[in-house]
């Protein structure tokens, strides 16, 4: 019986861990290519956070030329002081986005490597005991740990981080080109906007139709946030409306009735007395 259980469990675990390893391998390949692109971009952009030595040299040469011309004409040219250097807002945002993209990409690769190690450990540990009964207990213990610590959800973390890294890289690319050439940046903004909108549609399609095969790693996260936020917001609005109703409106219907009757009586009595006097 235990041998039959282990054979079935081994087939299931092999299929499961093979999927994990395949995802990790594809992530590592893409992350390696993407990290090299992000690194080259950061090397190019971080230079703009400090003053360019070439610009400083040109300014000094211009100052020397002006002083020599002034000395030849018998005039004194005072030395000029260069204004303090301050990088533009776009350059700062560009470097922030690209550095975040690089860090998230490296983190995604590290998580993919850990995922392969977890899969190898999960498959190998039940094979250590020689007795089938003990192997079955070890496998059951490890499988319950996978369910307890939500490993099936954690394996999506590297992909989620990688998609977020690409998103940050695209935003940084827009900031970078807006400092160089606005026309190119506008066309690039349109392209990035179209791709972002398509990604958003793929993310929310499973909400509209549960049978839709298209989804992204953010579909489950947004679905959980949406179904958690909406009930909480509805409860808060209901509580706030009750509080406002209690402050603005009278507490009981009896107060409304008595107040209405008092107003009606005060208006009706003088008119009746006036008619009786006439």
Image: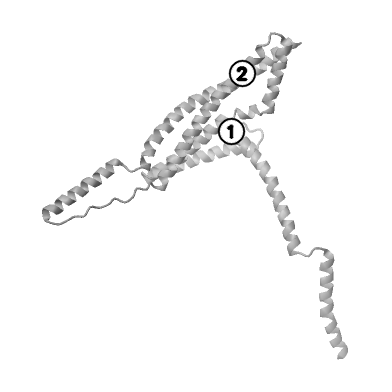
Mark toward the viewer: 1 or 2: 2
Q: Quadrant of residue 176?
A: top left
- The residue lying at 37 percent from left, 48 percent from top is 86
Other-residue count near label 1 (Cα within 10 Å), few / some / many at <14 / 14–19 / ≥20:
some
Which quadrant: the N terminus? top right
Residue 228 placement, left or right of 263: left
Image x and y of residue 31, in percent: 48, 28
Which residue in the protein does label 2 denote? Answer: 121
Q: Residue furthest right?
A: 276
**Front residue of this view, candidates 74 and 12:** 74
Above or below: residue 252 compared with residue 145 = below
Above or below: residue 52 compared with residue 73 = above
Q: Residue 191: tell me if it is visible.
A: no
Other-residue count near label 2 (Cα within 10 Å), few / some / many at <14 / 14–19 / ≥20:
few
Q: Secondary structure at mark 1?
A: helix
Image x and y of residue 242, in percent: 74, 57
- The residue lying at 66 percent from left, 28 percent from top is 149
**Front residue of this view, candidates 181 and 253:** 253
Q: Residue furthest bottom?
A: 278
Q: Quadrant of residue 213?
A: top right
Q: Residue furthest top?
A: 130
Q: Residue 54: tell me if it is visible.
A: yes
- The residue lying at 42 percent from left, 44 percent from top is 92
- The residue lying at 48 percent from left, 35 percent from top is 101
**Front residue of this view, candidates 42 and 261:** 42
Image x and y of residue 243, in percent: 73, 58
Badge 1 or badge 2: first in the primary sequence: 2
Which residue in the protein does label 1 denote? Answer: 217
Q: How many marks?
A: 2
């Amino acid at each position: 019986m235990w041998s039959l259980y282990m054979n079935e469990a081994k087939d299931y675990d092999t299929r499961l861990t093979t999927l994990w390893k395949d995802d990790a391998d594809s992530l590592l390949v893409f992350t390696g290519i993407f990290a090299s692109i992000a690194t080259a971009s950061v090397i190019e952009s971080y230079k703009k956070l400090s003053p360019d030595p070439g610009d400083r040299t040109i300014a000094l040469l211009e100052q020397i030329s002006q002083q020599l011309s002034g000395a030849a004409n018998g005039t004194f040219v005072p030395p000029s002081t260069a204004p303090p250097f301050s990088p533009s807002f776009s350059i700062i945002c560009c470097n922030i986005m690209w550095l975040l993209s690089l860090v998230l990409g490296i983190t995604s690769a590290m998580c993919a490597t850990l995922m392969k190690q977890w899969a190898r450990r999960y498959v190998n540990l039940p094979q250590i005991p020689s007795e089938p009964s003990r192997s079955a207990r070890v496998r059951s213990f490890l499988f319950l740990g996978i369910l307890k610590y939500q490993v099936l959800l954690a394996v999506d973390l590297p992909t989620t981080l990688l998609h977020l890294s690409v998103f940050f890289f695209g935003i940084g690319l827009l900031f970078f080109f807006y400092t160089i050439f606005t026309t190119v940046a506008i066309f690039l903004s349109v392209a990035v906007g179209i791709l972002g909108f398509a990604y958003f549609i793929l993310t929310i399609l499973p909400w509209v139709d549960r049978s839709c095969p298209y989804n992204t790693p953010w579909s489950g996260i947004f679905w959980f946030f949406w179904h958690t936020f909406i009930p909480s917001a509805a409860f808060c609005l209901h509580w706030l409306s009750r509080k406002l109703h209690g402050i603005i409106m009278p507490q009981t219907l009896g107060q409304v009735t008595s107040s209405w009757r008092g107003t009606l009586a005060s208006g009706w009595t003088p008119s009746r007395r006036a008619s009786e006097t006439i």
